[in-house]
Each structure stands twice: as structure tokens, then as C-alpha cells.
Image (spheres, grey):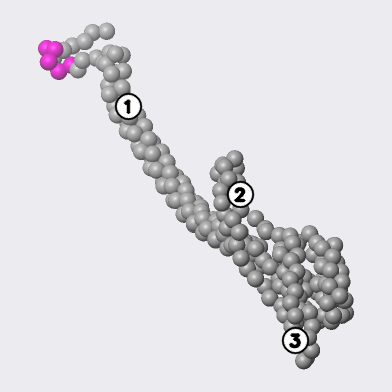
Amino acid sequence: MFTIDLLKGRGIPIRSRPEGIAIAVATAVVPVVLGTAMFGWYVHNKVMVSINKQRAANYTAKISELSEAVRVQESLDREKAAYVHQLSEVKSNLGRYRQWSPVLAAMMEKMPDSVVLTGLEVKKSTVKKKVPRKDNPQILKDVAVPVTTLRLTVCAGTESDSNAAIKDFRDKLRSSQFLGSQLDNIVVSQELAMLDGREVMSYEIDCVFKVEL
């Protein structure tokens, strides 16, 4: 086969070699691949950002709910502490006051028929006692504790009969199952008095209750 070059080598295009074709194809394809990859990465990042924003919103909502729950719990804890303190004060105050109805009922039950109750008085006083310190039980400290005394004023007939009746009354109070464990001492004093225009023996019976620390 003969080739006639009428243009004397100036018009015939250069034949493409495989290397050139590969370079040309790579030059055209690489930008497309990179662009596709970058677009895919962009879309992926955008989706992840949207998901993370939603997660952050959910976490914020949960934190807000938990914060409210924490505030409610703290408020309940403060109320509980206040109630415990108030109950402690109530318990402390109740310890200072004695229920007198059962005490008086027990005393009236033991009182002889020949004795007439003419007076009733509750006396409060304080005594110093040594008690262990809470922070160091080995060290004792002086504290003022209340002492309660119930004074009964009674009258009886003749001195000989009344003395025996009062002694029996005192012994019954000491041996009483209800009162005996509560009483620390019973002090009796006597004097002449007038009752309904006649002379009788008047007795003051001081029932001293045990100190409650």
C-alpha cells in the first residue's frame, strides 16, 4: 500500500499511541471521579450533620427533663429534711410533757376511801446531770434536765388513822405496775388544817418522777 502525501507531511495527523490515549482518558475521568467522590462525601456529611443535630436535640430534651426531675428530687429532699427536723423537735418536746390522764387515773385508783383530795399541782424544776458528749462519749458534760413533781394535797381524819392510810397509799403507789417504774421518790409532809369547819390532818404527797435524759 502506497501513501501519497500531497501536503508534503504538513497535513497528516499524528497517529495516537496507547499511552496518549490512556493519559487523555485519565485526564477526563479523574476530575469526574473526584467530583463524584466529593459530592458523595458532601451528601454523607450533610446527612450525618442532620442526624447529629437531631441527636443533640433529643439529648437536650432529655437533659431538660432530667434537670427538672433533679430539681423536683432536690425539692423533695429539702422538704423531707425539714419534716424530719420538725418531727425530731416534736419528739423532743413530747418527751418533756407527760400524759397525766393515765397517771391520775392510777393514783385515784390507789387512793383510800378515807382520804379526800383537796389539791393537785404539777411542779417543774431542773437538775444538772453529767451525760456523755455526742462527739466524744468518753467526755462527760453537764446538762440541765427537767424534773417533774406531782404534788397531791389530801386530808384525812384523825392523825393515827390518817397516817396509816397515807402510808398504805404511798406503798401502793410505789408498788404500782404502771407508776412504780416512773417514780423516783415519794415525799410526804403533814400539817393540821381546817376542812368544813373541823380540824383534820393535811398531807402533801410529792411524787417525783424519774429524770428522762
State which tag comes first along the sequence, 3 or 1. Answer: 1
Secondary structure, magenta segment, majority class: loop
| Label 2 sits on residue | 131
- Could you tell me residue 169's position as x and y percent? 84, 70
Q: Is residue 112 left or right of residue 184?
A: right
Compare residues 137 and 108 and report the one nearer the observer: 108
| Magenta segment boundaries in residue numbering | 7-12
- Residue that badge 3 annotates: 194
Q: Give the residue displayed 86% in from the left and 75% down from the top.
A: 160
Identify residue for label 1.
Answer: 29
Q: Nearer the viewer, residue 209 or 116?
A: 116
- Which residue appears at 21% of the width and 15% of the height? 14
Spatial CA span between label 1 and label 2:
97 Å
For label 3, the crowd category at 10 Å Cα-Cα, with few meaning under 14, some 14 to 19 and many 20 or more, is: few
Which residue is at a point 38% across and 39% down the rendered structure image? 45
Residue 13: name its quadrant: top left
Q: Which residue type carries mark 3?
A: Met
Few, some or many residues within 10 Å of mark 1 (<14, 14–19, 20+): few
Q: In this view of the protein, which residue sits in the foreground, 55 or 158?
A: 158
Which percent across, then down, holds residue 213?
Answer: 65, 55
